[in-house]
Image (cartoon, rainbow, N blue to C red):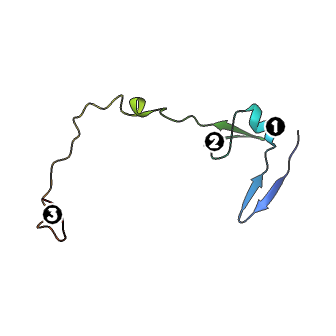
Amino acid sequence: MRSKISKWGNSLALRVPKTILDTACIKENDSVEFIAEKNRITIKKKNREYRNLDELFAGYDGNNLCEEMDTGSPAGNEII
């Protein structure tokens, strides 16, 4: 399948056919990585670094807690 490079503002754009995106399991708003080599550009779907909150906090050990800071007296109707 062929496509054409077009002008898009100050950049160039490539329209990727839906069948190619479906085959590569890439959909709108997915992050992709471009790998440039001589006469070749590879587009690779960038996987999320975590899938859920358990994976996000898997390496968290609790040792980087911040200390409380006094910012002065309340300025509004805060409940103390």
Q: CA distance from mark 1 to mark 2?
A: 17 Å
Mark 3 secondary-structure assignment: loop
> Which amino acid type corresponds to the residue marked 1 in the rendered image?
Thr
Q: Quadrant of residue 12?
A: bottom right
Q: Residue at x 16, y 60 (%)?
A: 79
Disc 2 target residue: 32
Decide: few, some or many residues near mark 2? Use Cα within 10 Å; few <14, some 14-19, many ≥20. few
Q: Nearer the viewer, residue 28 or 16?
A: 28
Q: Nearer the viewer, mark 2 or mark 3?
A: 3
Q: Residue at x 63, y 41 (%)?
A: 32
Disc 1 target residue: 19
Give how far across and how far down residue 40 sits, in percent.
76, 39
Give how far across and how far down residue 73 sits, in percent.
11, 67
Decide: few, some or many residues near mark 3? Use Cα within 10 Å; few <14, some 14-19, many ≥20. few
Asked if the residue under mark 1 is in contact with the one under mark 3, i.e. CB atoms within 8 Å, the reply is no
As drawn, 60 above or below 10:
above
> Which amino acid type corresponds to the residue marked 2 in the rendered image?
Val
> Which amino acid type corresponds to the residue marked 3 in the rendered image?
Thr
Decide: few, some or many residues near mark 1? Use Cα within 10 Å; few <14, some 14-19, many ≥20. few
Mark 1 secondary-structure assignment: helix
Q: Earlier in the sequence, mark 3 or mark 1?
A: 1
Q: Residue at x 78, y 61 (%)?
A: 7
Asked if the residue under mark 3 is in contact with the one under mark 2, i.e. CB atoms within 8 Å, the reply is no
Q: Nearer the viewer, residue 19 or 3?
A: 19
Disc 3 target residue: 71
Q: Nearer the viewer, residue 64 or 37?
A: 64
